[in-house]
Amino acid sequence: MICALASGVQAQGKSKIIFDEDTAGLGGTGTRSLLVLLQAPNVDLLGVTGDARRDEEAAHSPRVLELVGRTDITVVPGVAFPLFRTKEWTLEREKHYGSVRYLGARSQRPNNHRPFEVPTLREGNPTINATNEDSAQFLVRTVKAHPHQVTLYARGPLRNIALAISLDPQIAEITNGIVIKGTSIPPRTDSPEFATDPRDEVNVWFDPEATHIVLRAHWPSVQITTTGVSLETQFTQEMVDQLLKFSRRWRNTLPSMLIRDAARCGMNWPQHHGSIQA
């Protein structure tokens, strides 16, 4: 399954977009969304602001951009933890309401590395780095440089944008609007993630204070794509064929997760295109 962005912006020329994401490496939904934006002929991607596992994402995103030859795009580290929810608060809540399935940067890693430790990336470590600028400051500065032209696409918890609004409460008004991947209206799925609560959706509940700040701001346009939209958006054979038209270097880095998704949908993906190389 692959995320699809439909910003609804049909202005003349290219749509200026800042991508606020939670890239977790090749094959993740954040990376796939980034690739969609990079290929879109009508998109001018002004920057990528990270989220969730901040330091890892500040390595994954530049590496993806290296692999596709787009090192001109700025990557800015995001906020590592929720605005107010501490680890101690979360552990106390678990005593009363049960375990929390996602802790962001505090979540258990496969190799038990710590929140700010960046392991060796499967796709190879980047040779370029994210900037040292604060994500909120980057958002404010970039939007002000292009008043009424920038659309924010947020596909993770909303704390980077919430902090930008806290820095400059008028910043939302001079964007072109915001597109949010979040919320859930009983999606049609057998995933255990929604078995007990069909309205459970991590981007909103993980940092509700940030969500509150963002949704109360004065945006010219607010569009929200629910989890159901993502689940209904299928990875097609046409998408596979387009990916296989990439340069040989990029084809050799196509992740196994994409191959598995194609296979589940009964699509043809030549096996020699599936290796991961640094």
Image (spheres, rainbow, N blue to C red):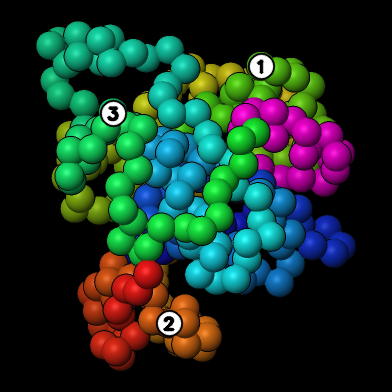
Q: Is residue 16 left or right of residue 104?
A: right
Residue 217, image x, y percentages: 68, 23
Foreground mark, 1 or 2, reads 2
Q: Which residue is mark 3?
A: 106
Residue 27, image x, y percentages: 36, 63
User: Which sits earlier in the primary sequence, circle 3 or circle 2?
Assistant: 3
Q: Which residue is mark 2?
A: 251
**How many angstroms separate mark 3 from mark 1 (CA)?**
24 Å
Q: Amino acid at mark 3?
A: Arg
Q: Residues within 10 Å of mark 2 (few under 14, many from 20)?
A: many
Q: Residues within 10 Å of mark 1 (few under 14, many from 20)?
A: some
Residue 125, image x, y percentages: 41, 58
Q: Amino acid at mark 2?
A: Arg
User: Which sits earlier in the primary sequence, circle 3 or circle 1?
Assistant: 3
Q: Which mark is residue 189?
A: none
Number of labels in the image equals 3
The extreme front residue here reads 127
Q: Helix or strand or loop: what does disc 1 sit on? A: helix
Disc 3 and disc 1 in contact, CB within 8 angstroms: no
Q: Which residue is mark 1?
A: 166
Residue 32 in sight here:
yes
* Chain part drawn in magenta: 134-155
